[in-house]
Image: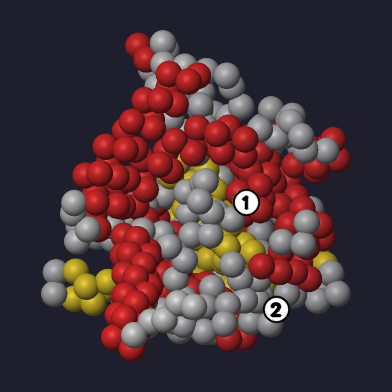
Amino acid sequence: MITTSRREFLNRLGGGFGGLALATMLNEAKADSNPLAVKPTHHPAKAKAVIQIFCPGGLSHIDSWDYRPELTARQGKPFDPDGKLQFFASKPGDCQGSYFPFRQHGQCGRWISDLFPNLATCVDDMAFIHSMQSKSALHGPAMFMANSGFILPGFPSMGAWVTYGLGSECEDLPAFVVLPDVRGLPPGGVINWGAGFLPAVHQGTTLNSVSKADQPPIADLFPPQSYAHLKGQQEQDSRDFLVLLNRQHAADRLGNTDLEARISAYEMAARLQLSAPEVTDITNESASTMALYNVDHEDIGPFGRQCLLARRLVERGVRFVQIYCGAENTTAKKIRPNWDSHEDLVRDHGYWGAILDTGASALLKDLKSHGLLDSTLVICTTEFGRQPASQGKGRDHNPGAFTAWLAGGGIRGGVAYGSTDELGFQAAENPCYSYDLHATALHLLGLDHEKLSFYNNGIARRLTDVHGHVIQEILA
């Protein structure tokens, strides 16, 4: 029979509790050192992930989503009889009705132009905000505002704020992934998905959606040829040795959480060598899925592939995916490389309309068929709209009005919020800015936009600055 004194019992019990406490403290320290650890929400979330489709250049709301019959009725009449207005790059021409006919669609009866015949079949899942505005008529600043809430560069993008607020549920892929247009970066470049003053780990990771053997999905993901001799067991031994050195170094510096975060980043890079090629390999998708996205089409296919990859990414736990439908302007092409249709709107919007229509409608239908639409918030926006007056055969920039639409997690489909005036010139009813769109998206993700902040330069900064309200009217 083994006997234990009261003192020994208490010592052992205390030691056990001490060991448990130490283990708990070490686990908490490890969690604190990982900035992408899953964090609690402010309230129950309706959506787990976001896919944002951005159409740079200024998609014309009055030729797509915003039906303005009075503008067509005034076709050819002076838009500015007094001659007092000056648009971004022109004096206003005559009133120009939509270049594309509008028709009613779905059970909700929403008006959509013939530019988007496939998306028109999805209107019962979509909610439209017709009263969006921007504070700039310049592409770069307007892009920054749409992405970060500020017209100046250097502020965190929405994707960075989301991962800062929620962390990541995926260990093998970045929390925030960006799929730029194959033609290049958008106006403003990589700043559009930057982390600003937030920790750099929250910035978007650019993923190459082009399927070519000589183009890895992430730049510099694999070692250069000078390290080609490190293969198989030799490569694994080298990695194991580096892990050992890093862990020993960190063990002596438990209070330095930056070390653990840096180690986690390097370990993520190693895992990406397997996960990134797997997620971008769409050869195992069915023929019907490939046809839905029209991935083999020369012009439509690249964006279709981006949308398909977005579904595959959220399917694997990626928190925020941003897709760009259009790139920076260049005069080398006959067709504008984005939606900036100054010279010929029928030509440029006709080209880009088919691209967006195919990819975005396929994405909504594919998410629904995989049971992912209810948990994924899809947002489609642009930086500003276009003017109701003609600019030759095109339209000038219009920061006073544009349309954004949302679908999926927590959205009440088939509804519209706000409206422009009878000509589509200015937001007239319930004007909205990026602050309101961002506040609504954060709310659906379980985040209170007024509580999600980061102290920087003496100010508790927010994605919505000191503005913004949740648009309850479009919520389910």
Is there any visible trace of residue 351 in the rendered image?
Answer: no
1 or 2: mark nearer the eye: 1
The residue labelled by disc 1 is 316
Tell me the element at label 1: loop
Q: Which badge, 1 or 2, comes first in the chain's sequence?
A: 1
Disc 1 residue type? Arg
Q: Residues within 10 Å of mark 2 (few under 14, many from 20)?
A: some
Tell me the element at label 2: loop
- Give the side of residue 163 with respect to residue 376, left or right: left
Q: Quadrant of residue 434?
A: bottom left
Where in the figure is residue 345, as x and y percent of width and height?
59, 46
Disc 2 residue type? Arg
Up-down relation of residue 51 to residue 185 (above or below): below
**So how many labels did they put on this image?**
2
Please state which of residues 54 and 133 is positioned toward the viewer in this rendering: 54
The residues bearing labels 1 and 2 have C-alpha atoms spaced at a distance of 25 Å
User: In the current view of this chain or complex, which residue is farthest to the front?
Assistant: 1
The residue sitting at 42% across, 49% down in the picture is 204
The residue sitting at 47% across, 49% down in the picture is 174
Please state which of residues 47 and 364 is positioned toward the viewer in this rendering: 47
User: In the current view of this chain or complex, which residue is farthest to the bottom?
Assistant: 6
The residue sitting at 35% across, 11% down in the picture is 226
The residue sitting at 55% across, 48% down in the picture is 323
Q: Quadrant of the C terminus?
A: bottom right
The residue labelled by disc 2 is 412
Up-down relation of residue 302 to residue 117 (above or below): above
Please state which of residues 331 and 119 is positioned toward the viewer in this rendering: 119
Is there any visible trace of residue 455 in the rendered image?
Answer: yes
Where in the figure is residue 433, as x and y percent of width and height?
44, 73
